[in-house]
Image (tube, rainbow, N blue to C red):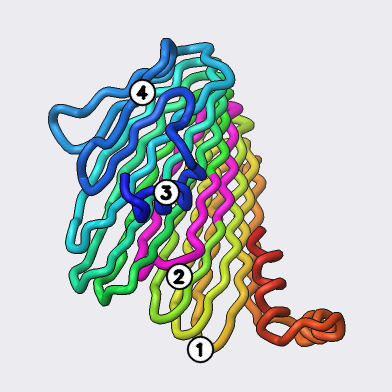
Amino acid sequence: MDKIEKTLLEAVADLHNVPEGAYNIRANGELSGRATTANIDIVTKTDKSGIDIRIKPGTKNESVHIPVIISQSGLTELVYNDFFIGDDADVTIVAGCGIHNSGDDESRHDGVHSFFVGKNARVRYVEKHYGDGDGNGKRVMNPHTVIVLEEGASMELETTQIKGVDSTSRVTNATLADGASLVIREKLMTHGDQFAETDFTVDLNGEDCSANVISRSVAKDRSKQRFLSRINGNNRCAGHTECDAILMDDASVCAIPEITANHLEASLIHEAAIGKIAGEQLTKLMTLGLTEQEAEEQIVNGFLK
């Protein structure tokens, strides 16, 4: 890999070298590297672009890295990755996409990730999106995540986008069975004329299942954000959705938390707050010697931490 590709890989997957364990690295639409383990297999799809990742039941303390990087201006792709996590497994999956575009043509990655999590399995899924480059071409990413949690399964999804993506539509659909639990934490920052749309839908179908959806975002300059979160309580369950946004400059944020109870014992809560940085926060930091810009950066970094 060249220096640009290595920088992208570090930004989206925290990788400085080839990772230990199973991995699949995709660069400019082609396979760049792959490794499997005794418990984790990765196979290229034959009917469409993408891979199948199969994790054996009972697998513990293993990880899978599947980053995508694009450094070629004008490249667009649609990739389907399916994860089959066996019963009682406990694994970490690190994904993400980085685009460097120094040309005039749009570079775009659309990815559909489907997770089928077996009974009592635990999954931590980390996904980062990052863009850079000095060209006029757009950097576009549209991740679509499908989550199916079987009885007693749990999943934590951490999704982060804090720089350089001109347009994104982030869609997540989840279905939970008895006793399953899902936690989603989104961190998002837009600037310039960027646009970001988030669309979460969680169906709490199982008895005593639960979901907690939390989004924190910062909108700067003239950027626009739209956040939509739906939680449907279809059984005795617990659901919570929360959106907190900081608005700066001439940006705009639209937040639509939606909860629907279709069962007498569905307990659902929604929260949404949008506002500017409080003046007293800036004043306090500026009295410590920071400029106004430095104070804003400190507040934003702390908010998205």
Circles 4 and 2: CB atoms closer than 8 Å: no
Three-letter residue code for mark 2: Arg
Image quadrant holding the N terminus, namely top left
Which element type, helix, strand or loop, lies under badge 1? loop
Which element type, helix, strand or loop, lies under badge 4? strand
* Residue at 36% across, 61% down: 169
Three-letter residue code for mark 4: Ala
Label located before the other in sequence (2 or 3): 3
Which element type, helix, strand or loop, lies under badge 2? strand
Mark 3: few, some, or many residues within 10 Å (few <14, many ≥20)?
A: many
Q: Which stretch is magenta? A: 158-186
| Residue pointed to by mark 3 | 172
Mark carried by residue 35: 4
| Residue pointed to by mark 2 | 226
Q: Nearer the viewer, mark 3 or mark 1?
A: 1
Mark carried by residue 250: 1
The x and y percentages for residue 305 are 66, 58
Label located before the other in sequence (1 or 2): 2
* Residue at 32% across, 61% down: 100
Three-letter residue code for mark 1: Asp
